[in-house]
Image: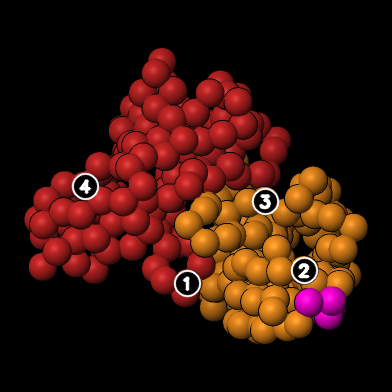
Amino acid sequence: DTGVSQDPRHKITKRGQNVTFRCDPISEHNRLYWYRQTLGQGPEFLTYFQNEAQLEKSRLLSDRFSAERPKGSFSTLEIQRTEQGDSAMYLCASSPPKGTYNEQFFGPGTRLTVL
Amino acid sequence: QQQVKQSPQSLIVQKGGIPIINCAYENTAFDYFPWYQQFPGKGPALLIAIRPDVSEKKEGRFTISFNKSAKQFSLHIMDSQPGDSATYFCAARKGPGTYKYIFGTGTRLKVLA
């Protein structure tokens, strides 16, 4: 069990560019979540997958954001036409299929800076 | 109603002290309350969690106290160490069959050697 991994760990981009982040959940975890965390705040929920199905999206996820989990394993989060307000830490978490309370295990995050 | 309010924002204690971090919620449908520890540049790590039918849970030096009637819960760190210096987040799950966690705003703890 190597934990949730995220790539890249840091991304600096210019406003208007597209960026894509990858998340590899813990093996056998069928549930995957994306959160966004800004400085001094707690993580805010963005979206949730069970296997390959995207079951919930936050209103925070504007049309410029899209997430996929094509084979029910890794997931990608893409941000199109980035804005300075998108600068944040993007966190991925996963949880196992069993367990009543969906304990979520977080990855190290991808820190995005939009110039 | 969907918020979890956390206090204090920051906390400094001496080594061996018992820092206490408090959280309050409004929505009685919340049914699971985890605490996370986050070091700079790292993702949050699950520390300890409690269900609302339990009033207290201990794991090592970490204790959660839960007051269902007051809709409050708190984290106590016994015999705190400099290595406990981190940001702590409380969270709540929105209810049975849901998967979204609502997080508090975090408490930055510093334990002085």
**Could you give the CA–CA distance between mark 4 and mark 3, rounded to whole angstroms?**
28 Å
Crowding at dot 2, Cα within 10 Å, few <14 / some 14-19 / many 20+, comes out as some
Picture quadrant where residue A96 is located: bottom right
Q: Tell whether B49 sits left or right of A14.
A: left
Tell me the mark number nearer the camera, choosing from 3 and 2.
Answer: 2
Q: Tell which residue pokes out farthest to the top in this image.
A: B69
For disc 2, the marked residue is: A83
Query: Which amino acid type is marked by label 3?
Result: Phe
Q: Which mark is residue B19?
A: 4
Q: Are marks 3 and 1 on the same chain?
A: no
Label whose residue precedes the other's in the sequence (3 or 2):
3
**Could you give the CA–CA distance between mark 1 and mark 4, rounded to whole angstroms?**
22 Å
Query: Which residue is painted at 62% across and 67% down in the image?
Result: A88
Q: Quadrant of the N terminus of chain A?
A: bottom right
**Could you give the CA–CA distance between mark 3 and mark 1, rounded to whole angstroms?**
17 Å
Query: Which residue is painted at 16% across and 47% down in the image?
Result: B18
